């Protein structure tokens, strides 16, 4: 069975040039990047090279990039590091929208248990945080405002620059979880006006187990990992050279192809969305059409449990997800759709389609063709089993 | 044929899946998640714990079939656990496994299976399905009488039997384990599950008191003449025929004869007073689809481990039946099932009033 992968927001296949670079790094660049000798220098040069590519993707300076082990670690580092660094100033208030990824929400919840005040901002029905809402919530003891750039479930892009401006006016630091936007839409940290930004390699055709955080020059955080002096004392631990090399090549690749990919993938996503909404009765898009990352659409199917549809599609060779992959298998409806105020049943019947560079028009058309009969079949079976 | 197998992670359903796959069927493994495991805690039991889901997944991978976990936590809590608690509260002794089979596996899970394009749902039950002479499906006891599970499957209808498969029903347990070893399944020597899955330590009273503290209602222990002979801490702690835990001393051993839930009264008396020859049952299912005309001679089983005894049964209406044993039976217990057999054919059954 030819399988169709439409779950690129969960993870992406490793690009061939990324795999090749990592293969070489594993074999040849095994030196410790902190060592003085030739072997260390070889590894160090590769890490520096990767750092430049990541910086270029973000419009940043290489010295502002810190490598981590994941997007989740970057989020933790930014939030915990900022909260602790600003603790002596008396700023004990943290703000984030209620639709953040759990890497942010659970980190905030952990800090709330330790005495920080946490405000979760509501979003409008299209999934957007309005600047007025932030304006009302922010105070002069707010330490950090963390706002995701693009949402992982619905793809909507937040008005980050406007939000950052408000935060700055109150002297707060601004972090953005850009895990779902990096590689999909252009990022310029200066234009966004943020202080901290998190990314993850495997969301844009890089390897798992490596991420990065950008810190604006001059911003000081408490180190999240303590130990050796790697990453300018900001993140201890021997560098994951193959992973970092892979991230660098993925960033280089994204910088080169991003605009072209966005146009092509965006057109396919629009074709898929229009085809599904037209072809399946009782299908509704969740979240704003724009601004949105070009690869994502989230659709609810009336009178369907997303769990069934997900399995049915997989058995038909089509890989999608419901909500975010991290929370699949739990009973909770998507916290994102819930925060948008969607009816309970609609939050339990949503499917996320996220396209990628390998997606073809033929694949999209097959999904459009398969969905109507699968949905109708599932709806027709609601009363088969036994008497109740 | 495309078949969904309900995989619990135990040896029976693992072998069921493996045998179907070996026969060349298009097999899909599905495990039911029945309670919240997101924090990694096993709040309930030994069956379908996170370890069992892991075992099911590993077996599915080993035999090369897709495997999915479906979340039935709400339904399980409402339909199975809820019924278990309300039955004890009413002074009855429930069988949650039967409800799980009829209200979850062969209804909701079967619906899902059909939605996935499957023709049938298979489980690891020890039971057999044959096509009868008139084309109707016949439910038979598992070949291994010691493991037979038709007592828990009496409520299956013709529609459900048409889409059910029991691949290990024609095997005995030793043969199932030999198949597991031959196929090198990791669960080959896994012990059988014993207790009700969501009460792994078997302490039903404690489970009910935790889930519904309001049921902890003390009351009197009375004898057959209505005299108070002691106190008890709640009717949910008793079942008909129980002798232990009454806290009474008397010349001859005393047994629980009757539980009067509204008054919170537990009636005790001598063993001889436990004997009854007649019962009525509700929510009766006749596997063939229609009730027999008039009285029918059957062998009737009133507990999972009861040797079916000669009796005659007749339908009173669509849902009720009355039954008379040839010889008196001890401890006929409201809430348990009475299941009717003709030889090894399960004719149906109902819930004892």
Image: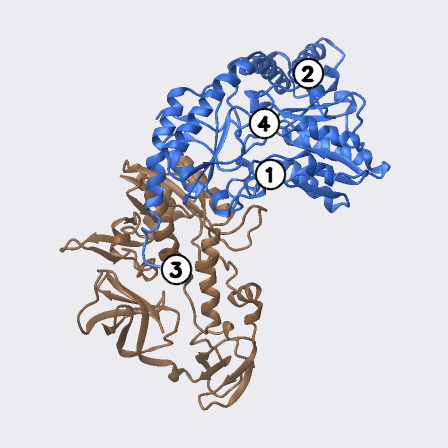
- Find the residue positioned furthest to the top: A38
Q: Is residue A144 above or below residue A41?
A: below
Colour of chain B in the image: brown
Q: Which residue is mark 1?
A: A124
Specify the quadrant of the image occupied by residue A363.
Answer: top left
Q: Are marks 3 and 2 on the same chain?
A: no
> Which residue does the numbered mark 4 point to in the structure image?
A180
Element on which disc 3 rests: helix
The one of A89 and B286 positioned closer to us in this rendering? A89
Does residue B270 lie above or below A197 as drawn?
below
Residue bearing the label numbered 2: A59
Color of chain A here?
blue
What is the secondary structure assignment of the residue under circle 2? loop
Identify the residue at horizontal 46%, vertical 25% (top origin): A270
Earlier residue among tags 2 and 1:
2
The residue that label 3 is drawn on is B99
Q: Closest to the observer: B43 or A131?
A: A131
Real-space CA distance between mark 2 and mark 1, rounded to the nearest whole angstrom: 30 Å
- Can I make out residue A222 in this image? no
Please, what secondary structure does the residue beneath circle 1 have?
Answer: loop
Disc number lying in front (3 or 2): 2
Quadrant of the snapshot with the C terminus of chain B: bottom left
Q: Nearer the viewer, residue B119 or A225?
A: B119
Whichever of labels 4 and 2 marks the residue nearer the N terminus, that label is 2
Crowding at mark 1 (Cα within 10 Å: few <14, some 14-19, many 20+) = some
Can the viewer see residue A293 in this picture? Answer: yes
Q: Chain of mark 3?
A: B
């Amino acid at each position: 069975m030819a399988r169709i992968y439409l779950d690129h927001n969960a993870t992406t296949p490793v690009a061939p040039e990324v795999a090749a670079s990592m293969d070489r790094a594993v074999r040849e660049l095994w030196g410790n990047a902190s060592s003085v000798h030739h072997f260390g220098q070889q590894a160090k040069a590769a890490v520096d090279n990767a750092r430049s590519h990541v910086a270029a993707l973000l419009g940043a300076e290489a010295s502002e990039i810190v490598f981590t082990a994941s997007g989740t670690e970057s989020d933790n580092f930014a939030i915990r590091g900022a909260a602790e660094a600003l603790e002596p100033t008396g700023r004990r208030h943290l703000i984030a929208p209620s639709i953040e990824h759990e890497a942010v929400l659970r980190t905030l919840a952990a800090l709330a248990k330790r005495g920080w005040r946490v405000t979760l901002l509501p979003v409008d029905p299209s999934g957007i945080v309005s600047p007025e809402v932030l304006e009302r919530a922010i105070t002069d003891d707010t330490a950090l405002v963390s706002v995701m750039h693009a949402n992982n479930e619905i793809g909507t892009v937040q008005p980050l620059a406007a939000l950052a401006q408000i935060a700055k006016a109150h002297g707060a630091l601004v972090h953005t979880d850009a895990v779902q936007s990096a590689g999909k839409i252009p990022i310029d940290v200066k234009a966004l006006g943020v202080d901290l930004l998190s990314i993850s390699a495997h969301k844009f055709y890089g390897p798992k187990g490596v991420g990065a955080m950008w810190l604006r020059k001059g911003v000081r955080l408490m180190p999240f990992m303590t130990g050796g002096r790697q990453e300018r004392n900001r993140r201890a631990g021997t560098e994951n050279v193959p992973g970092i090399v892979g991230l660098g090549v993925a960033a280089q690749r994204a910088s080169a192809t991003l605009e072209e990919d966005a146009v092509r993938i965006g057109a396919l996503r629009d074709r898929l969305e229009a085809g599904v909404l037209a072809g399946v009765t009782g299908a509704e898009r969740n979240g704003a059409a724009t601004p949105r990352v070009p690869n994502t659409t989230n659709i609810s199917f009336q009178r369907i449990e997303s769990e069934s549809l997900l399995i049915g599609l997989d058995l038909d060779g089509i890989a999608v997800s419901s909500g975010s992959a991290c929370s699949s298998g739990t009973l909770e409806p998507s916290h994102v759709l819930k925060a948008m105020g969607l009816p309970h049943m609609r939050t339990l019947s949503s499917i996320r389609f996220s396209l990628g560079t390998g997606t073809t028009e033929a694949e999209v058309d097959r999904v459009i063709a398969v969905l109507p009969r699968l949905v109708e079949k599932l709806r027709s079976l609601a009363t088969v089993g036994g008497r109740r | 044929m495309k078949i969904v197998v309900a995989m619990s992670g135990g040896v029976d359903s693992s072998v069921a899946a493996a045998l179907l796959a070996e026969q060349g069927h298009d097999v899909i493994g599905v495990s039911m998640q029945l309670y919240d495991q997101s924090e990694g805690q096993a709040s309930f039991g030994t069956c379908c714990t996170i370890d069992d889901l892991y075992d099911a997944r590993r077996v599915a991978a080993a035999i090369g079939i897709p495997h999915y976990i479906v979340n039935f936590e709400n339904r399980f809590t409402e339909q199975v656990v809820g019924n278990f608690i309300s039955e004890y509260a009413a002074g009855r002794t429930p069988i949650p496994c039967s409800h799980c089979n009829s209200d979850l596996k062969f209804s909701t899970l079967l619906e899902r299976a059909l939605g996935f394009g499957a023709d049938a749902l298979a489980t690891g039950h020890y039971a057999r399905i044959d096509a009868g002479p008139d084309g109707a499906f016949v439910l038979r006891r598992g070949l291994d009488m010691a493991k037979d599970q038709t007592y828990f499957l009496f409520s299956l209808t013709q529609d459900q039997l048409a889409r059910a498969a029991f691949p290990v029903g024609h095997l005995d347990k030793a043969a199932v384990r030999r198949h597991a070893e031959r196929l090198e399944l990791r669960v080959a020597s896994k012990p059988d599950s014993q207790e009700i899955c969501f009460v792994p330590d078997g302490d039903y009273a404690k489970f009910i008191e935790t889930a519904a503290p309001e049921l902890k209602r003390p009351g009197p222990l009375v004898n057959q003449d209505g005299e108070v002979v002691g106190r008890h801490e709640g009717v949910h702690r008793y079942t008909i025929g129980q002798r232990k835990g009454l806290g009474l001393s008397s010349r001859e051993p005393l047994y629980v004869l009757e539980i009067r839930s509204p008054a919170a009264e537990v009636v005790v008396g001598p063993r001889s007073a436990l004997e009854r020859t007649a019962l009525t049952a509700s929510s009766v299912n006749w596997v063939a689809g229609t009730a027999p005309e008039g009285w029918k001679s059957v062998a009737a089983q009133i507990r999972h481990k009861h040797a079916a005894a000669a009796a005659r049964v007749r339908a009173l209406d669509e849902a009720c039946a009355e039954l008379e044993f040839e010889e008196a039976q001890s401890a006929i217990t409201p809430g348990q099932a009475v299941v009717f057999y003709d030889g090894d054919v399960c004719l149906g059954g109902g819930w004892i009033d």
